[in-house]
Amino acid sequence: MNKPESQLSGHSRRPGRSQQGRLLARFARRVRDIIVECSQAQRRLAELTTSPDRYLANPNEAPDTYEEFLFRTSGLMRHEPPARVRATR
């Protein structure tokens, strides 16, 4: 019957199960956020590197022909949020 006092009172020095669960959930959310951010950065990098404008001599000039316009718009287009979402920013 020589148990430490912490075991007699029912409390231990280790964090409780609910606290461990909260810590684990917070860690999982951080890992998820990092993965989402890396995915978005990878997608944006792919958009930029495959953009036809990147390989033109003067990308800021307007296209001279309709064919050139179609060539420039043939790559991946960046998703634009709806007007409602843009208005709230």
Image: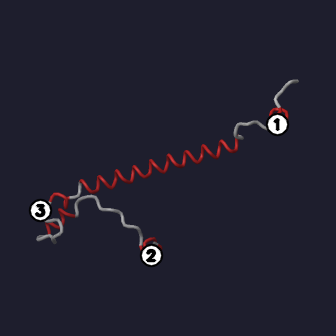
**Position in image of residue 19 (x %, y %):** 68, 44
**Position in image of residue 5 (x %, y %):** 83, 33
Residue 10's disc is 1
Q: CA distance from mark 1 to mark 3?
A: 75 Å
**Position in image of residue 78 (x %, y %):** 32, 62
Helix, strand or loop status at disc 3: loop
| Residue in the image at 29% along x and 62% along y | 77
13 in relation to 74, above or below: above
| Residue in the image at 76% along x and 36% along y | 12
Helix, strand or loop status at disc 1: loop
Q: Is residue 7 left or right of residue 72?
A: right
Residue that numbered label 3 is attached to: 57
Q: Residues within 10 Å of mark 1 (few under 14, many from 20)?
A: few
Q: Residues within 10 Å of mark 3 (few under 14, many from 20)?
A: few
- Which circle's residue, 1 or 3, is located before the other in the chain? 1
20 in relation to 48, above or below: above
Residue that numbered label 2 is attached to: 87
**Position in image of residue 34 (x %, y %):** 46, 49
Q: Is residue 25 left or right of residue 52?
A: right
Q: Nearer the viewer, mark 1 or mark 3?
A: 1
34 in relation to 4, above or below: below
Helix, strand or loop status at disc 2: helix
What amino acid type is highlighted by mark number 1? Gly
Q: Quadrant of residue 63?
A: bottom left
